[in-house]
Amino acid sequence: MYTIPIILGSTREGRLSSRVATFIERKLRATGRVNPEILDLEQLALPMLEERLRFLKDPPASVVRFGSAIAASDAFVIVSPEYSGSYPGVLKNAIDYLQAEYKRKPVGIVTVSGGNFGGISALAQLRLLALTIGAYPIPSGFPVSRVGESFAEDGTATDASYEKRADGWIGELLWLTEAVADKQAKDVAGLVA
Ligand SMILES: Cc1cc2nc3c(=O)[nH]c(=O)nc-3n(C[C@H](O)[C@H](O)[C@H](O)COP(=O)(O)O)c2cc1C
């Protein structure tokens, strides 16, 4: 089983990206190969960063929880709305708390827009961010357009094409997750041999 948390980067009152996070969580769980968990930045309410987690003497419980979840992960997913042609500041604030926890972790990027373009500007920038923090973004993005019409409140895809797209995208995420996990297991076996 792979541990794959989903960082939900929308904290807006009345947000819609949570629908997509719920959908992805359900699809990951349905593979039978993944323990998914939504790390909801609205619920976590991480304080504005004053220092990275590893340098904090008395870190807030929410930051420790976020850090532990990413540290224990085999891969992670980011679900981000597109705001002003980019990803939200609250998401960057969360990402900046950690460093080594992301290294060599596959990351799947899901971007959400109320309009027609699926948040592809945010997707491009999140790929760069992922590379900068030492994670491995999978080549395919998962852009969601017209989220209000495409997903119901309970996370059901009302536009059925998202089911098929998600299957392919999750297949790619799990392919890379397995490859990296196998390599890491070999490295560990080499260390103890
Ligand atoms: C501050 C702000 C800026 C936004 N900028 C964009 C944008 O640049 N491109 C876009 O497609 N949608 C933009 N939107 C609309 C979002 O795509 C829309 O709110 C969508 O439902 C996903 O975000 P949510 O999780 O906040 O609902 C913006 C919304 C807000 C609140």
Image: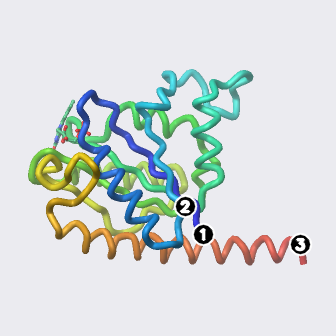
Please say if 50 is above or below 18: above
Of helix, strand and loop, which one carries label 3?
Answer: helix
Which residue position is annotated with label 1?
Answer: 1
Label 1 vs 2, first from the N-terminus = 1
- Judge the density around disc 2: few (<14), some (14-19), many (≥20) Cα neighbours within 10 Å: some
Q: Are marks 1 and 3 in contact (CB under 8 Å)?
A: no
The label nearer to you, 2 versus 3, is: 2
User: Percent position (x, y) of residue 124?
Assistant: 29, 54
Location of residue 63 by image quarter = top right
The label nearer to you, 1 versus 3, is: 1
Q: Are marks 1 and 2 in contact (CB under 8 Å)?
A: yes
Label 1 to label 2: alpha-carbon separation:
7 Å
Does residue 1 appear left or right of residue 149 in this picture?
A: right
User: Percent position (x, y) of residue 49?
Assistant: 53, 25
**Most foreground residue, 155 or 143:** 155
Which mark identifies residue 35? 2
Which residue position is annotated with label 3?
Answer: 192
Amino acid under disc 1: Met
Amino acid under disc 2: Asn
